[in-house]
Image (cartoon, rainbow, N blue to C red):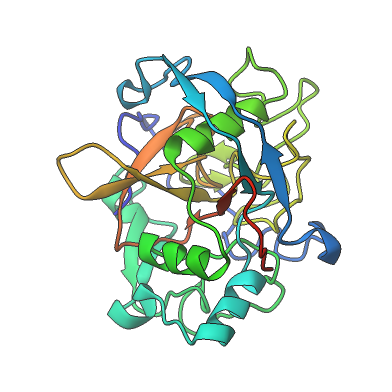
Amino acid sequence: MLIATGCVLIAGLVATAISIRLSDAGSGTACGLEESQLGGFVDIPGGGFVMGADPHYAEEGPPRRVLVSPFRLQAHEVTNRQFSAFVADTGYVTEAERNGGSAKFSETDTPERVLSWWSLDPGATWRTPDGAGSGLSGRDLHPVVHVTLNDARAYADWAGGRLPTEVEWEYAASRGLFDPMDPKSGVRAPDGTARANVWTGLFPVLNSARDGFAGTAPVGCYEPGLTGAYDMIGNVWEWTDTPFGTALPRVTIKGGSYLCSEDYCQRYRAAAREGMERDFSTEHVGFRIVKTMGDAGERR
């Protein structure tokens, strides 16, 4: 189970605080990309950057200079519509569907206990993101979730691409920042306007949905970064193809999600990283794909 390490929960959380259920807030908001924009890629030129710049947690540093070859980055996270097309074409069955469900975040009467925030829901899959009885109605343009690394790789192969390396992902996210000197400039504009879908309020008991959503948002609801890519920060964590350390078979995920908050983990930065078991899935982890410059055959 994914638990953000190194984060400090504010003492004295009030369990009776008013909260907004993740499945209710923002579900009817009309925004996102137009049909003609779905499945598009942006070109990321080769170059150098400082990886792990301004590290907030030990695993993000030390800062080091890295050179990156050019590549093409899908402009948005893979959507339910895209993943549905893949499944319809191939008959693919995700690991959550085969192995007994996926992890869901939920309200709890004991918010001071980190382990009480998450549970394995046997009815949670990419088709039923809120558990048994839920569905994808109105969520075609939301990022697909409850997918493992293997599920994401299978989609990428079908779509003629691959998952990004951590270096590629962080390089693209860093180039997209509105203010290179401010690692949090991808979250909100100087006037306070939301630039990403993160947790607004007191985590984990009060989500004000001040940025428009308490759960996932349709892709493209917030302005793109300077590269033209959407939602590199927030919305859902994204799989990369880079191992996370050597102690366990974990893989690096990047970008933070709608569960990242100012008062808790602050992992809505390009340098932020977490580790995830390759055969595990949750409701706040998705992915996007990349292509080596010159590759053809894009799918939607």
Seen at 36% across and 19% down, the residue is: 61
Q: Farthest left residue?
A: 247
Residue 289: image x %, image y %?
A: 56, 54
Residue 284: image x %, image y %?
A: 48, 55
Seen at 66% across and 31% down, the residue is: 45
Q: Using the rendered view, name the quadrant where residue 192 is placed.
A: top right
Residue 146: image x %, image y %?
A: 45, 66
Give left or right: position of 91 versus 22: left
Residue 250: image x %, image y %?
A: 26, 48
Image quarter in which the C terminus is found: bottom right
Give left or right: position of 158 versus 57: right
Q: Farthest front residue?
A: 294
Give left or right: position of 129 versus 298: left
Whether residue 210 appears in this view of the structure is: no
The answer to whether residue 12 is above or below residue 251 is above
Whether residue 78 appears in this view of the structure is: yes
Seen at 43% across and 62% down, the residue is: 153
Image quarter in which the N terminus is found: bottom left
Q: Using the rendered view, name the quadrant where residue 159 is placed.
A: bottom right
From the viewer's side, name the closer residue of 249 and 114.
Answer: 249
The answer to whether residue 295 is above or below residue 234 is below
From the viewer's side, name the closer residue of 256 and 12.
Answer: 256
The answer to whether residue 44 is above or below residue 117 is above
